[in-house]
Image (cartoon, coloured by chain):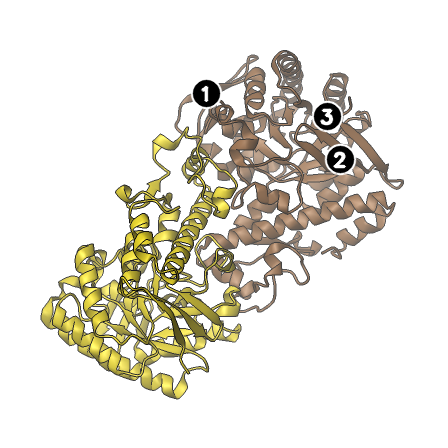
Chain colours: A brown, B yellow
Amino acid sequence: MSHFDIQTRDPSSRARTGTLKLAHGEVRTPAFVPLATKAVVKTLEVREAAELGFDMVLGNTFHLFLTPGHELIAQLGGLHRFMGWKRPVITDSGGFQVFSMGHGTVADEIKGRAAQAASAGERAGAILKIEEEGVTFRSYLDGSTQFMGPETSMEVQAALGSDIALVFDECTPFHGGREYTARSTERTHRWLDRCLDWHAQSGPEGQIVYGIVQGGVEEDLRRWSAQEVAARKVDGIAIGGTLGEHKDQMFEVVDWALQELDEARPRHLLGIGEIDDLVRGVELGIDTFDCAMPTRIGRHGMAVVPDPGHRWRVDLAKARYRTVDEPLLEGCPCPACAHGYSRAYLHYLLKAREQTAQRLLTIHNLAYLQRLMAELREAIDAGRLAETAAAIRGGAFY
Amino acid sequence: MSHFDIQTRDPSSRARTGTLKLAHGEVRTPAFVPLATKAVVKTLEVREAAELGFDMVLGNTFHLFLTPGHELIAQLGGLHRFMGWKRPVITDSGGFQVFSMGHGTVADEIKGRAAQAASAGERAGAILKIEEEGVTFRSYLDGSTQFMGPETSMEVQAALGSDIALVFDECTPFHGGREYTARSTERTHRWLDRCLDWHAQSGPEGQIVYGIVQGGVEEDLRRWSAQEVAARKVDGIAIGGTLGEHKDQMFEVVDWALQELDEARPRHLLGIGEIDDLVRGVELGIDTFDCAMPTRIGRHGMAVVPDPGHRWRVDLAKARYRTVDEPLLEGCPCPACAHGYSRAYLHYLLKAREQTAQRLLTIHNLAYLQRLMAELREAIDAGRLAETAAAIRGGAFY
């Protein structure tokens, strides 16, 4: 049985709408997937993501493995019950987090996931050994020595009971060089087979598995990795790793990978979620995205606004907002804006270090992304994606 | 016109139910008043206090005077609009906060308000001079020299636009001695007159004023202060200052004051909100209470539970809750408990320093106090306060 139905194909691009049919329900695509990295959408209850209209959240294998531990979560009824979320969950494999400890600052170059990693504190951890078997590392929590390999990652994700498990991969550094990237990508393919073997034997009922395309930023390696992953019996395909130094390179790299994939299976783009990137990813045929952006910038006092000239964001901590008696975003229907808080109030709360500010901005940012994705889905279904994409890029979408 | 209607008097005690009729609506009494000290109920939106059933919140003159400033709040439409709250607001005068900087650690002895003061950071400030005119102090925010006297306090409260203003008082230290307490209380009475004079001239339409009884812990001084305050044209009377070292002394002191007051005007007990204290205060005829307890202990990982043997609280950060698959409080109808989070999940969130834990506990604690006060009101109206009070004291109220 297929886990993914394609509904409408856009005539002007490779965009499509569809439905992921997962153990805990359906996900309308293209979709943005908010992070519930540590079994919570930071500053919110996870269930509030459903109130905002999201169908799926992303949990993190690495963090939950370290604390509170997958055994405990399993004992407490699995990740869904633990965090009070009834809809689908996708779990990242932990590969990115494990390797971002070792590849350190290079991670800064890849898709902004570094700030997420740094704020989570992984930098205090360290990779001790990368071997064929897996990775030995020092926990950022207590300095203990830990091991994670393909089987460990799948075992953790099985215990968590996610709807979609991602295979364990090495997220290669941008400056690793062709030689290292080729060897690493080849090992990632061997790990992919081990993940699929483990899952075939021991995977939980109803959980599906996505492979991850690596291969760095060189065309032949990236295409080769996409072919290798597509050749396996994976239920979907995620594109991960180093995608380049700037957006044009990033989408060139993503496009190489997508050209090697069949149409039928769903595609996830890991760690990408800027407004313009979402539009471009949808046009290229990406079905789901996850990114720390909306939640992370919210915690740093920033709100998503339709302002392409300022990266679609406004920094409310700036002194100029101290006296501004205007709403965060005029006409915005989100629960935070609906109550009419002024920019001056949000500025004040941020300066007073009141958590409520971070919460309100997180709600606004997630709501904006949810509306954006709903608008893109509607546009594809209505055959007017080109106009909608142009309007969003022009800052006309609220 | 009277601002306070008494509805039912309990035959077995001095408890009464009533209604405060204020500029922004009615307050059913006896009532607990959550703190919105800095124009926010910490970890929540202020409006959520209404969803929890509260009629009034308390804002703080001292903090809002320092930041963002009462002029700015007035310019932005007043405190209600600034923080998105449509119901009544009572503002503390700032006296407690100003003097807790100078009287320092003695504040620890008075009613737990010290922890509130400390967490707000006032200790970094300092009193520079106490004079007949008022108090000169150093701001805890930026070290600047600031002045607050009776007129300043009333002016700030006028600009904030609260429904009930409290007069500016000196909160005398427990170890100040009889001589100091007598002189200080006499000055507080002179400040009361100045507050009332200012308000008669310049107070905003619809704002009513409560006097504050001081007088320390000696019977004659406390009774004298109550008589002096009661003799003024105040709309209500708050009991403040040092109330003693232990609960029996505290309520003896409160009782002396109450015995000197007329029945007609509403009485507020400042900074008191432990479960057993609320019951006892209600029995003595207190109409409204404010206290940092429910919000503060929530932020410190504690939940209010019907457990008189452990001060009606449970510390979820304790290791013993790591694996406990039970709700915070079985059968509790509060929005946090209704979603079924386990103690293990709350423990985990606290350990992971996720704000969501503090928010959930704050919601639970406030909801508990709101239900408790509603139960007390219902019991008084039904003529069964004695049974209800006994049940609450016995830990039978959920």
Residue A147 appears at what percent x and percent y?
49, 18
Which of the 4 image quarters holds residue B4?
bottom left
Q: Secondary structure at mark 2?
A: loop
- What is the C-alpha distance between the residues marked 1 and 3? 29 Å
Tell how many labels.
3
Residue B162 appears in the rendering: no
User: Do the residues indicated by labels 2 and 1 lie within the same chain of the protein?
Assistant: yes
Q: Of tags 3 and 2, which is closer to the observer?
A: 3
- What is the C-alpha distance between the residues marked 3 and 2? 11 Å
Instruction: Please report the residue visible at 21 percent of the width from the left and 80 percent of the height from the top.
Output: B228
User: Do the residues indicated by labels 1 and 3 lie within the same chain of the protein?
Assistant: yes
Instruction: Please report the residue visible at 42 percent of the width from the left and 35 percent of the height from the top.
Output: B343
Mark 2 sits on what residue? A286
Density class for disc 2 (Cα within 10 Å; few <14, some 14-19, many ≥20) is many
- What is the C-alpha distance between the residues marked 2 and 1? 34 Å
Q: Are marks 3 and 2 in contact (CB under 8 Å)?
A: no
Residue A377 appears at what percent x and percent y?
78, 43
Circle 3: residue type: Gly
Instruction: Please report the residue visible at 51 percent of the width from the left and 60 percent of the height from the top.
Output: B47
Question: In this picture, is A162 found above or below B360?
Answer: above
Q: Which of disc 3 and disc 1 is earlier in sequence? A: 1
Residue A200 as seen in the image, left or right of residue B194: right
Q: Which of disc 1 and disc 2 is earlier in sequence? A: 1
Q: Which mark is residue A236?
A: 3
Which of the 4 image quarters holds residue A396?
bottom right
Question: In this picture, is A221 found above or below A369?
Answer: above
User: Do the residues indicated by labels 3 and 2 lie within the same chain of the protein?
Assistant: yes
Q: Secondary structure at mark 1?
A: strand
Circle 1: residue type: Gln
The chain that hosts pointer 3 is A
Mark 1 sits on what residue? A146
